Image (cartoon, rainbow, N blue to C red):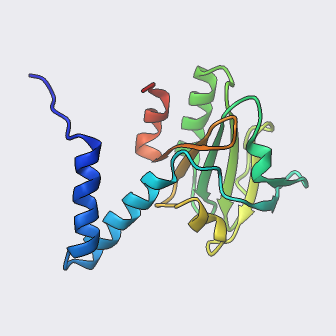
Amino acid sequence: MQKKFIPQQIVFKKLSLIAKYSPNTTNKNLAKSILQKSEFRGKKAPEFKQKATNGKTYTEKTLQTDTPTLLTFLDGSVANTASVRALKNLQSKHKNKFKIVIFSCQKEIADLPTDWVQMVVPYHSYLLAAYHLGRFPYYVLVTADGKISKQTWQQYLVQLDKKK
C-alpha cells in the first residue's frame, strides 16, 4: 500500500482558511502558528545578543560559520537528560558536522559538553518569540550562512537526520 501525501500548497491553503474563519480560537491560533513557522524557514536567523555561561557574548552572526548550528531551547527547571542524550547521539552520528547552541530557560543545565555554547534566558525572553518557540524542548537548525532550515520538537528530532 502506497502512502499518499497531501501537497504542501493545499495544506497551507486549508490552514489559511482555518486561521481566518475558524470559530474555535485554539484551532485558529494553532493554524496561525504553523503558518508563521513555515514563513520563517529560509529567512535569516533573528537578531540576538546574549552572554553565554562561558562568559562570552554571542550574536546571530556567531551562527554564520563553516557548519550548521542546531539551536536548542530547553526548560532549565526540569531534567533534560533525554534531550541532551539525543543531541549527543545525533552529533556523534554525524561526527560533529554541526554545532550546538543551548538556550536554557531560567537556569543553567549542568554537565553539557564543553564545546556546546549555553545561554540562560528568562521565560519571557524576546528570543523565544523571535525563534517561534512552540514548546520545550525545541530545535531550530540554522544553515552555515545563518538561515533557518528546519524547526522541530523532541519527538521529531530524528527528522533533522533525514535528507530531503
Q: Quadrant of the C terminus?
A: top left
Q: Does residue 7 lie above or below 129 as drawn?
A: above
From the viewer's perspective, is 11 left or right of 32? Answer: left
Q: Position of residue 84 (x, y in %)?
A: 60, 42
Q: Quadrant of residue 59?
A: bottom right
Specify the farthest residue to the right.
Answer: 55
Q: Residue at x 54, y 45 (%)?
A: 42
Tell me if 48 is positioned left or right of 38 in this view. Answer: right
Which one is in front, 22 or 139?
22
| Frontmost residue, 40 versus 79 | 40
Q: Is residue 103 left or right of residue 148?
A: right
Number of numbered discs overlaid on the protein picture: 0
Compared to 75, does 8 lie above or below? above
Q: Is residue 51 left or right of residue 34?
A: right
Estimate the x, y position of residue 160 in percent, counting from the top left. Answer: 49, 34
Could you tell me which residue is drawn at 24 percent across and 40 percent down?
7
State the image quarter where residue 156 is shown: top left
